[in-house]
Amino acid sequence: MPVVELKGVSKRFGKVVASSDIDLRIEDGEYVTILGPSGCGKTTLIRMIAGILEPSEGQVLIGGRDMSGIPIEERDIGYVFQNIALFPHLNMLENVSYGPIVKDMSEEDRQTIPVRYLELVNLLDRMKVFPSALSGGEQQKVALARALASGARLLLLDEPLSALDARVRMDLRYELRRITKDLGLTVLHVTHDQEEAMTVSDRIVLMRNGRIVESNTPEMMYRAPKELFTANFIGETNLLAGVVVENRDDRTLVEVRDGTVVEAQPSKFEPGDAVVISVRPERVHALEEGLNAVVRTMSFMGTYIRITAEADSEDILGFDVPVPRGRDFNIGDNVHLGWSMASALLYPRPPGGIAEAVKLE
């Protein structure tokens, strides 16, 4: 199984820098998702690994071998595209047989391998059907089987689920992880969908403006993001500007814009430091005391009601209340909002402002 390494990789298109000084290592059998907003450089990155694009600077290594000048067909990879690129004039079995034929495998392998992978994606009973007769999800499963049938140990997935309906996406992402883990493949999966990345990945690599912002497990990216952009991009969060007034061993006290003092996790900030508090909506609660706010909107979300309230500090905070208790609130109600000290993370206040630090472009 191949280790993938990128060392100082950059890609420029004229004056446009699509990727800048990327260092990344993907271990044997690891499922890594490159996540980020549109235009952040994630597709450029996967295309350089595939050999569709050559880096302007730096090295791409697969299994320790420098891929400079090595064409895509010699990199021993499987590639699944966003636009489901099946051969329309071939049935499912013939589509999946393409790799073994091109690789000049033995006659026995040409007969058995396509059948094995169609069975793996639960489409063996439709092997004589043409692409036009399949649903989008079924077509993408066949595209996956075709990529696997070539014998590649490295699988590249470029927005493989974005063209599918929501329910199909949900089902197929579980199938992707199950199949690739069962086969012990190394996987690099590109997506802009945060939930998709959280579901399938061993590790998420978050990109912005051609650079890696941070890399960690899905759980740590959500629970303890190192960067303010990450906290805002992965999941949802409330961001409040404040100033540190006291730093104790077990908590940090922060004064927000209306003068209310709130608690956050212990930190290295000093009194007087300008900071940003990040607290997830599911961690905010209506209490007896806390930030004074007025309910502005209420949205039914199934098992809970998402409420947004405008605080006296002029911050807009979202908080979640389980059904049916959420129906006790009404637009215009005065509420006091708070959270546990452990739920609030602190970040240095960006010189250019919070909005600039978290914007997607």
Image (spheres, rainbow, N blue to C red):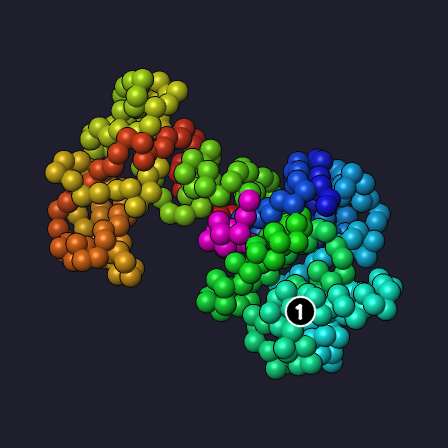
- In this rendering, would 260 be left or right of 353? left
Toward which corner of the image does residue 329 lie, by quadrant?
bottom left
Q: Amino acid at mark 1?
A: Leu
Total residue callouts? 1
Tell me where residue 183 sits by quadrant.
bottom right
Residue ID for mark 1: 118
**Residue nearest the viewer, comparing 81 with 260:** 81
Place of residue 346 in the rendered image (x, y in percent of width and height, measured from the top left): 37, 30
Nearest the eye: 159 or 21: 159
Q: Position of residue 71 (x, y in %)?
A: 82, 53
Residue 162 seen in render: no
Q: Residue at x 61, y 82 (%)?
A: 133
> Any magenta on residue 201?
yes
In the figure, 254 relative to 72: above or below? above
| Residue 27 percent coordinates (x, y) | 66, 40
Up-down relation of residue 314 to residue 226 (above or below): below
Q: Which residues are magenta?
A: 191-202
Q: Does residue 53 sit above or below 350 in this rendering? A: below
Q: In this orientation, does residue 259 appear? A: yes
Is residue 10 covered in magenta?
no
The relative height of residue 262 versus residue 10 in the rendered view (above or below) is: above
- Give the residue drawn at x 27%, y 21%: 245
Horizontal side, residue 29 vs residue 231: left or right? right
Q: Quadrant of the N terminus?
A: top right
- Using the image as rendered, state which of residue 292 and residue 80 is in the foreground: 80
> Residue at (36%, 32%) from the top-left corner?
345
Q: Residue 293: give x, y in percent of width and height.
A: 18, 43
Q: Quadrant of residue 259?
A: top left
- The answer to whether 216 appears left or right of 302 in the picture is right
| Residue at (43, 32) in percent of width and height | 350
